[in-house]
Amino acid sequence: MKKQKGRPVGSKHKDRPVTDEQIAQCPHCGSSNRGQFASVSRINGSGTFRGKQYSSVELRRCSCNDCGGAMIVRRHIWI
């Protein structure tokens, strides 16, 4: 007999937290079609942004696929 994959029958769903994320747009043309991230650097340090506390900030460098402009996408790591 094969072992069935997945969640057992009758088990409850686990509640998952819902997060909000803004999509980065190119500052030159306004497009959200970006290339892969070239490099990632992290700045450790806590603070508040839009009323929420964060523990560090990631700076990810990439380029726009439409106009070729370079941009840095800032991402806060929330507590």
Image (cartoon, helix red, strand yellow):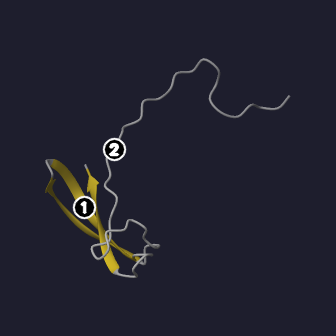
Q: Residue furthest top?
A: 10
Q: Mark 1 and mark 2: span between their CA atoms?
A: 17 Å
Q: Which residue in the protein does label 2 denote?
A: 19
Residue 36's x, y, as percent? Answer: 47, 73
Per the image, label 1 sits on a secondary structure element best described as strand
Q: Is residue 3 above or below residue 78?
A: above
Which sits earlier in the primary sequence, circle 1 or circle 2? 2
Q: Quadrant of the rendered structure where residue 28 is? A: bottom left
Q: Is residue 79 above or below residue 57?
A: above
Q: Is residue 79 above or below residue 5?
A: below
Residue 64's x, y, as percent? Answer: 40, 75
Name the side, left or right, on which 78 lies relative to 33.
left
Q: Nearer the viewer, residue 74 or 48?
A: 74
Name the side, left or right, on which 8 lies relative to 64.
right
Residue 52's x, y, as percent? Answer: 18, 48
Amino acid marked by disc 2: Thr
Q: Nearer the viewer, mark 1 or mark 2?
A: 2
Q: Kindly identify the residue that appears in the image at 65 percent across and 33 percent down.
A: 6
Q: Kindly identify the residue that appears in the image at 18 percent across and 50 percent down.
A: 53
Mark 1–mark 2 CB contact (< 8 Å): no
Per the image, label 2 sits on a secondary structure element best described as loop
Q: Which residue in the protein does label 1 denote?
A: 56
Mark 2, other Cα within 10 Å: few <14 / some 14–19 / many ≥20: few
Any mark on residue 48, and which?
none
Residue 70's x, y, as percent? Answer: 34, 81
Q: Kindly identify the residue that appears in the image at 64 percent across and 20 percent down.
A: 9
Amino acid marked by disc 1: Ser
